[in-house]
Amino acid sequence: MDFILSHLQALFKHTPEIALFLSLALGYYVGKIHFGKFQLGGVAGSLLAAVIISQVGVTIDNTVKNILFALFIYAVGYTSGPQFFRSLGKKTIREIIMAAVLAVTGLATVIILAKIFVLDKGLAAGIAAGGLTQSAIIGTAGDALAKMGQLGLLAADEVKRMQENVGIGYAVTYVFGSFGTIIVCVNVLPRIMGRGIREDAIKAEANEHQLGEVLVGEGQQLALAGLVGRLCRVDVGQGKTVADIESLARGNSNENMVTVEKVKRKNTMLPVMPDLVLQKGDQVLLVGRRAPVLQTIQALGRELNSTDGMEMIIQTRDVVVSNDRAHNKTVGELRQMATNEMRHGIYMLGIHREGQTLPMTADTVIEKGDVVTIYGAEQDVRRVAAVLGYAVVSSDKTDFVYLGAGLVVGLLIGLLAVNIGGIPITLGSGGGALLSGLLFGWFRSRHLHMGSMPDGAAQLLKDLGLAGFVAVVGLGAGLEAVETIKAQGLTIFVVGMLVTIIPLIITMLIGIYVLRYDNAAVLAGALSGSRSANPAFGEVLNKAENSVPTVPFAITYALANVFLTLLGPLVVALA
């Protein structure tokens, strides 16, 4: 055994990055193991694996830790930015209050218990990170401790010890932090409300259907598509022109209902012109709204399964409105302004403003920066996009100019400190990167031609950044962690349980009796989002068996990612 340990020590001393990636590999492997319905998760698993590996003796430069955390927290802000700023409005006031209440009660619970049980700043921050399952607190608290050391408020060895204690507090309390949230959201909440999550989810979904909205979850699609393509043979509709067919389907509206895209006569493809007269036996490809297309087929003849040469590719594109002529015009006005040639073959699927869906009615006002989703043949989409503004071209490449600039701005913000009552309050590099990410992500949502970061790239930064960061923390604090857990492990665990349960119960009761949530599924989604608790939300969705809890969760989750992350420096300042 000594022989193996000595060789591992030599290996990790020469190439410490092996220990880092070994921690990630083992951590994510352990994190996938199911304990009933519970999983430890890759981040907590990486920390556990790193603590075990650290017993051999590993040293990794703190710069690696800082870089990984900056990448993680910036990516969190970048992806949350549009949703975060959109959430700050009158329509979401209940969700704002929910997220704020949980953050404030979480902070108060940590501070009070830290004083009662005489816990240092590091352990208090670690318990906040684990008990509230907000791993980002580890980084923002560590930054705040380092800042106190630079200002001479803490000795260097105290800073190091407290930073190690942050990881220890997190490791001891994280498991119950996840498990306890599931218990409160899925089991306690329905009992207190006297309502079932599944029953209320069905009720909410029925209400949405009555409003004409069908909720579609991830990986789902409507069995009856709104836009279809159909092939028919002309048997009784001969003598009608292409313009006749399209105008009859359109009726008195200016909106396209049916478009004749191709016509084949015998073995010859004919150019589709408005004055083209259809003859018996012609094969016609129709594209448009499902019901009018089916009605048009009945008026022309009968439907065909397929025929050579009548295939056609239709595409969906997001178009950003940048033309001054379209600004402050209603959808109805734009339809009236468009000529038949401009309107031909184009169907509007949706309108979004800063990520928020707008109603597709004739009275909806279009503004510059809005994103209009259109459907049609390539040449038709290209023509309309050039008039409205520009099409959003999806890319799998990250704009590193934008990414680098955002990180630089965030790290510069993190250098700022404000003294309040002699206590330095600073966002630190983590908080600064989070704020910068929020702003840069929001700005990107309004200027989609710049700042590209594909979802996969952002997710990689978040996963690798956070897991790598906590692994470095575990590798550095592992030896001391064992001794601290032996001495204070039970106390830390009990305090962590209280930090998990108390804020959740208070926030839940305020949601029921003050904010007047009357739907268990909606409140469970909002409550789990207020804790940015993905495992709990997953269980809520399992109970609901539909996507009703998703909307309140998305709003409070975006807010909680900011509010809870900023608890790190506050706990360090006040504990």
Image: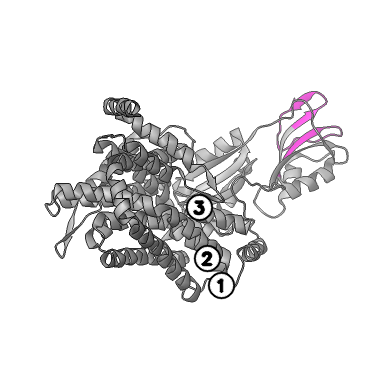
Q: Which residue is mark 1?
A: 193
Q: Are marks 2 and 3 in contact (CB under 8 Å)?
A: no
Find residue 523 and name its label: 2
**In the rendered structure, which disc, 2 or 1, sits on the residue that comes first in sequence?**
1
Real-space CA distance between mark 1 and mark 3, rounded to the nearest whole angstrom? 22 Å
Whether residue 421 sits left or right of residue 282 in the image: it is left
Q: Tell me where residue 242 sits by quadrant.
A: top right
Callout 1 amino acid = Met
Q: Which residue is mark 3?
A: 535
The magenta span reads 263-288
Whether residue 71 is visible: no
Real-space CA distance between mark 2 and mark 1, rounded to the nearest whole angstrom? 10 Å
Helix, strand or loop under label 1:
helix
In front: 38, or 221?
38
Callout 3 amino acid = Pro
What's the residue at 39%, 32% (across, down)?
A: 22
Q: Quadrant of the N terminus?
A: top left
The crowd level at tag 1 (other Cα within 10 Å; few <14, some 14-19, many 20+) is: some
100 in relation to 461, above or below: below
Q: Are marks 2 and 1 in contact (CB under 8 Å)?
A: yes
**In the rendered structure, which disc, 2 or 3, sits on the residue that comes first in sequence?**
2
Residue 519 inside the magenta-drawn segment: no
Find residue 275 and name its label: none
In front: 313, or 477?
477
Callout 2 amino acid = Leu
What's the residue at 15%, 47% (across, down)?
A: 156
